[in-house]
Image (cartoon, grey):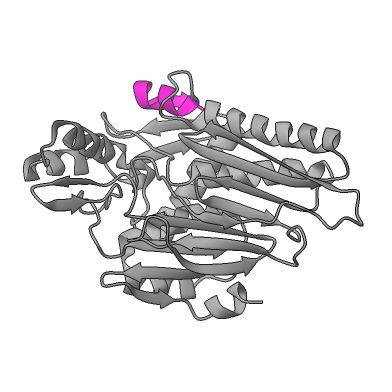
Amino acid sequence: MPFRKWLFTSILLTLILPGCTRNVTIKRTEFIMGTWVDVTVVAPNKKVGEEVVESAFHEFKRIESLMSNYKATSEISRLNRIGSARVSKETLEVINKAIAFSIQSRGAFDITCKPLLDLWREARFRKRIPTKDEIKEKLALVGYENLDIEGNKVTFKIKGMGVDLGGIAKGYAVDKAIKILKEKGIKQALVNAGGDIYVLGRAPKREKWRIGIQHPRKEKGILEVIKIRDRAIATSGDYERYFTLGGKRYSHIVNPKTGYTVASVPMSVTIIASDCTEADALATTCFVLGDKEGIELIDSLLGVEGMIVSEGMKVFTSKGWDSITGG
């Protein structure tokens, strides 16, 4: 699972519409949820465009206020401090979705990995790798099975547990922002939260949006350009927020079953799904599972495709990847 998953996916956009239409394209960027969020909409006029973009950003900020580990007033921060708390419908929805992904992945995705994430954050700061005993101690606090949910009340069964929604909350916020845009009549839009993306309808001047997937070992390189519409895409990679100690590279993604960071295998995972919540969670899940098990999981899911880049730049794709990304 990531400390805070920073996903830098290049987006190739043409923001000028044909001169024969009166539509305008409005794009705005803000720093929210620990990452840069871009909202691009095609609207009938500038005023409407700016209003709907503002609504989308308001939704991001609302979700952040509920689920951020870095805001002391958030519901998640309160839960982590007290160990038991009543939460909103949205926070409960995300927690329940996360548990479903945990069950699906046999624990490769687990929001209760916060104690491990904190341990590795401290290791990065102190430039000292955690000992086996330290990892064993924190592993005892990890396990989605130890979340007790009654109504809207969430309780930790073990003292010292904690949850981190960093591997799913941004995707959920993207979905909520897209829902707001649809409700306001927007039919063409792109919402991107640090690489967790949803593309709605046609792209300006094109039938599909063109999304560039970053090369995991070339800072400004594009590995592949895919063409999609009305789909979500999320990429998780080891090329951002890693650190090096003793000549060894340590990823920002931690395996909640072993307690250690995931290294080199894979380098990046890209997921295409019907919603960004699923794409976000599966990108992290498959990063932990690795190339073989990751592709097997993707191929077992309806409406999901993926690409995994493993050690030595070996590229693995799901059965329907080419049919979805071309055109």
Q: Residue at x 43, y 22 (%)?
A: 78
Magenta stretch: includes residue 271: no
Q: Residue 41: percent from the left, percent from the top?
A: 74, 46
Q: How many marks?
A: 0
Q: Visible in this render: residue 182?
A: no
Q: Which residues are magenta?
A: 75-87
Q: Residue 76: percent from the left, percent from the top?
A: 45, 29
As drawn, the residue found furthest toward the top would be: 73
* Left or right of residue 199: residue 322: left
Q: Is residue 313 above or below residue 167?
A: below
* Left or right of residue 197: residue 180: right
| Closest to the observer, 299 or 326 | 326
Q: Residue 316: percent from the left, percent from the top?
A: 39, 76
Q: Residue at x 55, y 79 (%)?
A: 322
* Left or right of residue 43: residue 161: left
| Closest to the observer, 57 or 244 | 244
Q: Is residue 21 above or below residue 273?
A: above
Helix, strand or loop for the magenta stretch, by majority: helix
As drawn, the residue found furthest toward the front would be: 19
Q: Where does the C terminus fall, quadrant-wise? A: bottom right
| Closest to the observer, 2 or 95 | 2
Q: Is residue 33 above or below residue 178?
A: above
Magenta stretch: includes residue 81: yes
Q: Residue at x 26, y 72 (%)?
A: 312
Q: Visible in this render: residue 236?
A: yes
Q: Residue 324: percent from the left, percent from the top?
A: 61, 74
Q: Quadrant of residue 107?
A: bottom left
